[in-house]
């Protein structure tokens, strides 16, 4: 039965499959430790990708062979296809297990996969699909269980009794399987009915459920064909061309029906001509229709093609690819996404899907080697054949070839896993990382500003800036340039007009626009506003002299007998401006050396504001009972530690607006 | 022309956004971020731009040419597609009108994100335990009689809150007070109250001086509720199940009987018994 070539093929395939399993193990760990964003190409506008399209949509369709063959053999009495039944049911069982496993990768919270059972929401098509798939998996397991229970390992009275019960239930199980399959195969199409705006009109159709069902039946037939050709190649069986020809004939009808329905529906909806309008979707549609239905249906109608292995292989591969393409097109390709947000799967997504299929293939090969899959009731003869899967002609029994095979498989597994770790992208190892935040242009917004005399002391009525400050009576609209390059909410409201007014009208242009660096369009803010972190000489000698009475006033500060008139020998600021002194302030105002220099904004806040607030809170707790000592009282926009450290502009908390407004007017009127 | 909206839906809460009053200051976004402690926006791979809706940004301002600012957020549809799509009922429409999300039910299938006609729900893809994120109309606040944070923060009254009927009344008053100011669809007698009918009506209404067709996946979303599309298919499920089951049982019985009769006839005709399984190597 088995030939040396087939044996060699099988060993090669198994080695490759074990290598894939090694890669699969690595990507599985990456997927579940670092999440979907780090390992897949999915985006907010492409929430369903390769895993849904291939593992679920295509996987379910590819496993349709199980119910189609079961229906043919058990319901329609086509006994000659009996030998296909068990392999087809096993493929379906493994296929559905692969679907479930694939779903575990795709679900964000796979440990909640059982939720539909206890939290049903029957308005959801997905709920129907989930329940049908769950039940059908059970049915498939029961349908396949005789093959396992017939194994000598289970020759015990209890198992044989169970086997008897299951065999009696065969027909109800098969009918249940057909019903469940029809329901969820069609409902996978209905899933897309909810998205009439995103699925391209060539694919979106009210009868999508019917198209999905019929294309799945056609695909199921061709998949059984392909599997039997493949297992003939792998296990060295003879190809039963006359049986395959029968499948091909049926598939020809089903695929033709699918093509007619699809085109008829397009005609009915008046979309038929858009298939020829030359857009890439139209091209995609034509190719998909040709390879999934039209060409196979025509070829399979020819007896010469049906009876040739090459012809059947070509047709089945075409149909398989075509129907998979149909699922991909509705799910990913012909699915509207905004410009600039393309979806392409990462290699990890491919590796997961290929790994799942490879695992299923290994299990299939294991069952094929150890169980009686031809399904004859008398298991003596096939079981004997099944227990010697490795060709006796090669001179090695299973026992002898097992150890070297195990060594080889372990070796390729480890090597492939190591290689996979080597080429894992950084994000798959360390978790998703954001791209560098692009710097945004400033935005121009309109704001209401209090109309105070000093233009740069305006209070802008922007809640983001200063809490909910009510607009004052004489508020006037101004244009504010919001400078917020990284959109992190600490924007600087730059008022161009106010700057021009404060710096001297038209004469002031040069201050910012002509004293800049090469290729700069304007002077950076910090070129003038240097007082953020630096000490600044804010003492205006001329102003003091003028206010205090010009030449006669020298002695007010430079006391007689203090020697040469210098900064160091003059009175300290606080000796006149008593209200500058705050008990416990870390600003050393009493040191003569610092007289005349104001500390930077940050030091002033930390050294003066906080101390003053603490002092006031002690003196008048009912008014100042605020937790000013807490860093996040000011640095409150973002509670994360990243941004607590540097806050160049702290928005005043609500309620502080009146204070600052009062402060402004006081400083205006209380000039010495 | 208009889809029949249930009268009780007009008593539920709604937001009216007047884009002509919006200056794009994004105070609403900031208030939302503070209320839900969303943190800063990052330039993730799965976002088209940093200030797009995301799991850290439930509302955003879309700036259109000509200094038009349109606030984008969950529409809280009267017949939400996401609610009908969710197979575990993690998304629910409440009596207040808010469509809320229960992360303890969610299994992360993201069918809601596929279903939404406005493309609103977002996912925190960066997490290994990801959840769906979207505006919930400040459900906890409005239950206690407070305003949604965004509405409370808006300094210009560009976005206001009340029952759907009140919002419609205010919109109509503004239409009457400012003839010609608001965008009017060609062939319509009155300016457009965007969201009144779209996909069966939404709880977030817009009046604007520009066409807001860009907000949905398609320029005309129609007035039919989205869930009706899948519900039509779902109602076919029981008849399909029964029909297939009946047909299969019938065919099994007929074919079984025919095979039996043939076998009996063959047995009568000749003594040679017919094999059930003739094909064997």
Image: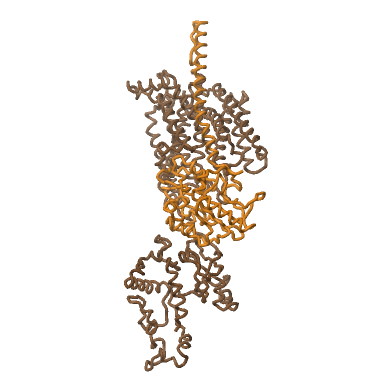
Quarter in which the N terminus of chain B is drawn: top right
In this rendering, the answer to whether B184 lies above or below A171 is: below
- Classify residue A388 as left or right of residue A317: left
Say if residue B241 shows up in the picture.
yes
Which color has been applied to chain A in this rendered view?
brown
Q: Position of residue B51 (x, y in %)?
A: 51, 57
Q: Position of residue B127 (x, y in %)?
A: 42, 50
Coloured how? by chain
Q: Nearer the viewer, residue A179 or A458?
A: A458
Q: Position of residue A154 (x, y in %)?
A: 35, 24
Q: Quadrant of residue B66?
A: bottom right
Q: Residue at x 41, y 61 (%)?
A: A642
In this rendering, the answer to whether A132 lies above or below A477 is: above
Q: Nearer the viewer, residue B31 or A670?
A: A670
Q: Nearer the viewer, residue A389 or A456?
A: A456
- Colour orange maps to chain: B
In this rendering, the answer to whether B132 lies above or below B87 is: below
In this rendering, the answer to whether A224 lies above or below A591 is: above
Say if residue A37 shows up in the picture.
no
Q: Nearer the viewer, residue A145 or A498?
A: A498
Q: Position of residue A400 (x, y in %)?
A: 37, 29
Give the number of marks: 0
């Amino acid at each position: 039965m088995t030939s040396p070539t087939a044996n060699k093929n099988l060993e090669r395939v198994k080695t490759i499959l074990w290598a894939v399993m090694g890669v699969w193990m690595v990507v599985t760990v990456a997927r579940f430790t670092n999440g979907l964003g780090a390992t897949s190409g999915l985006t907010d506008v492409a929430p369903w990708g390769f895993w849904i399209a291939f593992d679920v949509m295509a996987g379910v369709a590819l496993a349709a062979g199980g119910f189609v063959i079961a229906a043919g053999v058990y319901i329609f009495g086509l006994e000659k296809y009996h030998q296909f039944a068990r392999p087809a049911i096993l493929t379906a069982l493994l296929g559905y297990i692969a679907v479930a496993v694939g779903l575990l990768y795709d679900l964000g919270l796979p440990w909640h996969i059982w939720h539909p059972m206890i939290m049903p929401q029957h308005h959801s098509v997905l709920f129907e699909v989930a329940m049908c798939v769950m039940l059908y998996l059970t049915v498939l397991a029961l349908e396949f269980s005789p093959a396992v229970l017939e194994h000598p390992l289970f020759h015990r009275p209890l198992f044989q009794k169970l086997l008897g019960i299951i065999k009696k239930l065969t027909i109800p199980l098969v009918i249940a399987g057909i019903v469940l399959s029809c329901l969820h195969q069609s409902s996978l199409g209905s899933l897309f009915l909810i998205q009439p705006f995103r699925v391209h009109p060539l694919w979106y159709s009210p009868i999508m459920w019917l198209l999905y069902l019929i294309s799945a039946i056609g695909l199921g037939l061709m998949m059984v064909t392909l599997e039997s050709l493949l297992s003939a190649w792998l296990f060295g069986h003879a190809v039963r061309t006359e049986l395959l020809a029968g499948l091909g004939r049926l598939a020809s009808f089903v695929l033709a029906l699918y093509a007619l329905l699809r085109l008829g529906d397009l005609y009915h909806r008046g979309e038929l001509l858009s298939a020829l309008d030359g857009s890439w979707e139209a091209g995609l549609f034509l190719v998909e229709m040709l390879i999934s239905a039209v060409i196979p249906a025509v070829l399979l109608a020819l007896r010469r093609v049906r009876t040739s292995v090459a012809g059947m292989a070509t047709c089945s591969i075409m149909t398989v690819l075509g129907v998979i393409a149909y699922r991909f097109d509705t799910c990913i390709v012909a699915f509207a996404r905004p410009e600039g947000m393309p979806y392409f799967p990462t290699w990890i997504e491919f590796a997961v899907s290929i790994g799942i299929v490879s695992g299923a293939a290994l299990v299939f090969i294991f069952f094929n080697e150890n169980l009686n899959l031809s399904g004859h009731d008398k298991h003596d003869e096939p079981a004997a054949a099944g227990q010697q899967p490795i060709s006796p002609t090669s001179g090695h029994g299973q026992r002898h070839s097992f150890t070297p095979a195990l060594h080889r498989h372990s070796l390729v597994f480890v090597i492939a896993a190591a290689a996979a770790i080597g080429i894992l992208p950084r994000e798959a190892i360390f978790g998703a990382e954001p791209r560098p935040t692009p710097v945004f242009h400033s935005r121009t917004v309109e704001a209401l500003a209090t109309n105070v005399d000093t233009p740069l002391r305006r209070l802008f009525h922007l809640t983001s800036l200063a809490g909910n400050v009510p607009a004052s009576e004489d508020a006037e609209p101004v244009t504010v340039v919001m400078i917020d390059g990284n959109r992190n909410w600490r924007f600087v409201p730059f008022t161009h007009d106010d700057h021009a007014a404060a710096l001297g009208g038209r004469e002031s242009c040069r201050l910012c626009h002509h004293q800049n660096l090469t290729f700069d369009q304007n002077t950076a803010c910090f070129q003038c506003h240097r007082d953020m972190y630096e000490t600044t000489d804010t003492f205006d000698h001329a102003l003091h002299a003028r206010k205090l009475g010009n030449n006669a006033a020298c002695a007010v500060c430079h006391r007689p007998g203090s020697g040469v008139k210098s900064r160091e020998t003059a009175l300290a600021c606080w000796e006149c401006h008593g209200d500058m002194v705050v008990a416990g302030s870390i600003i050393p105002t009493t040191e003569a050396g610092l007289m005349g220099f104001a500390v930077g904004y940050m030091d002033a806040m930390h050294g003066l504001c906080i101390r003053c607030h603490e002092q006031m809170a002690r003196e008048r707790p009912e008014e100042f009972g605020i937790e000013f000592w807490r860093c996040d009282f000011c640095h409150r926009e973002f509670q994360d530690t990243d941004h607590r450290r540097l806050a160049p502009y702290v928005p005043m908390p609500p309620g502080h607006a009146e204070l600052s407004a009062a402060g402004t007017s006081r400083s205006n009127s209380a000039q010495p | 022309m208009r889809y029949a909206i249930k009268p009780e839906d007009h008593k539920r809460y709604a937001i009216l956004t007047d884009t002509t009053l919006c200056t794009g200051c994004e105070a609403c976004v900031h208030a939302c971020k503070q209320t839900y402690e969303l943190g800063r926006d990052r330039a993730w791979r799965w976002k088209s731009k940093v200030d797009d809706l995301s799991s850290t940004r439930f509302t955003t301002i879309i700036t259109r040419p000509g200094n038009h600012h349109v606030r984008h957020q969950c529409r809280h549809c009267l017949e939400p597609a996401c609610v009908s799509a969710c197979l575990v009922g993690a998304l629910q429409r409440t009596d207040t009108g808010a469509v809320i999300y229960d992360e303890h039910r969610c299994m992360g299938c993201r069918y809601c994100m596929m279903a939404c006609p406005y493309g609103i729900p977002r996912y925190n893809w960066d997490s290994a335990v990801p959840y769906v994120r979207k505006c919930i109309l400040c459900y906890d606040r409005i239950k206690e009689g407070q305003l949604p944070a965004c509405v409370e923060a808006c300094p210009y009254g560009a976005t206001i809150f009340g029952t759907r009927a009140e919002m419609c009344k205010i919109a109509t008053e503004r239409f009457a007070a400012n003839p010609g100011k608001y965008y009017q669809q060609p062939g319509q007698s009155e300016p457009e109250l965007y969201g009144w009918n779209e996909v069966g009506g939404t709880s977030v209404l817009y009046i604007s001086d520009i066409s807001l067709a860009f907000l949905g996946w398609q320029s005309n979303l129609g007035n039919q509720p989205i869930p009706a599309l899948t519900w039509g298919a779902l109602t076919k499920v029981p008849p399909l199940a029964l029909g297939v089951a009946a047909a299969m049982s019938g065919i099994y019985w007929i074919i079984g009987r025919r095979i039996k009769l043939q076998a009996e006839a063959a047995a009568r005709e000749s003594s040679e018994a017919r094999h059930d399984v003739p094909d064997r190597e």
